[in-house]
Amino acid sequence: MTELNRRHILAGGAVAVAGAAAFGDSAEAKVGATPIFPVAQTTIPVVGLKEVFPVRRIYCIGRNYAAHAIERGSDPTREPPFFFQKPTDAIQVVAIGTVADHPYPTLTKNYHHEVELVAALKSGGKNIPADKALDHVYGYALGLDMTRRDLQNAMGAAKKPWEIGKSFDHSAVLGPIHPATKTGHFTKGAISLAVNGTVRQNSDLTKMIWSVAEQISKLSEAFELKAGDIIYSGTPENVGPVVKGDILLCKLEGLPDMSIKIV
Ligand code: MN
């Protein structure tokens, strides 16, 4: 089977389910229906595997380090976790040992870096207890939640959704996924980001207000989580702007570095 044919068939399955929901038809009746055009499935490489991780949804947690919550104007001691999503095809994968060109996006004059641990789920559910949550994690990656801060702030001030500041092309940068069977689960460890060799963000995963397990538990109260979901777990303090030509170097203790150049 050619790669294109296989994608076609996989996409057909997704169309069949959507069609069944829209028209009250049975999903079975439309399995194998051919989509009118192919739509690519977003995937992330997995270290040590030839198979790839298929992405279903991208969740992000806001203000999950106390010092970052304070710099964004909220009280870290009282605010429950909150979430937003990015579109699946916002992903930009950065191969280990490379410096990927990352396009400076349109409409912004204040483009910010947010270095984050990313958890990738192999299974999910509703109302997952925190003490069972890590059983659903397939692996981890090092990521950047790139943000058009001026647009996010303007929309927030107008009490409108700040989607345009967060959910745009290439805004979900990350390295390949490392299976938790190899790395263990990330509950502590230094996380940092440098721009042109100067460290800007420098913290530790122990400073998260809500752990990855707690994030999964809380998320699953609002959404049914499923295999293929990934979660950006929040950024430490000292987010800041980048401009064209800047080289960003992200580090997380236990994973390879990840680097991009703003172009
Ligand atoms: Mn973030």
Image (cartoon, rainbow, N blue to C red):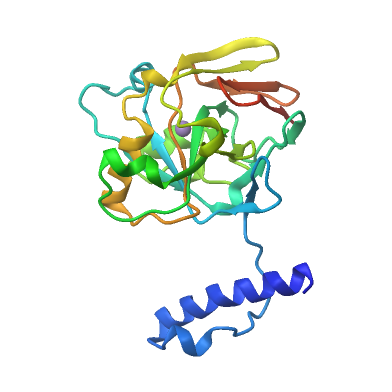
**Above or below, comparing residue 110 to residue 59 in the picture:** above
Q: Quadrant of residue 153?
A: top left
Q: Residue furthest top?
A: 198
> At 33% across and 56% down in the image, what residue appears?
125
Q: Residue 46 appears in which quarter of the rendering?
A: top right
Q: Position of residue 215 (x, y in %)?
A: 34, 38
Q: How many marks?
A: 0
Whole-percent x, y for residue 133 in the image: 34, 42
Q: Is residue 108 left or right of residue 123?
A: right
Residue drawn at (56%, 76%) of the image: 13
Image quadrant assignment for residue 179 = top right
Residue 166 or residue 230, whichever sits in front: 230
Q: Residue at x 68, y 24 (%)?
A: 243
Residue visible at 46% across and 55% down? 227
Relative vertical location of residue 19 with respect to residue 177 in this rendering, above or below: below
Residue 140 showing in the rendered view: no
Residue 53 percent across, percent down from the top left: 59, 51
Q: Is residue 57 above or below residue 247?
A: below
Q: Position of residue 104 (x, y in %)?
A: 68, 35
Quarter holding the C terminus is top right
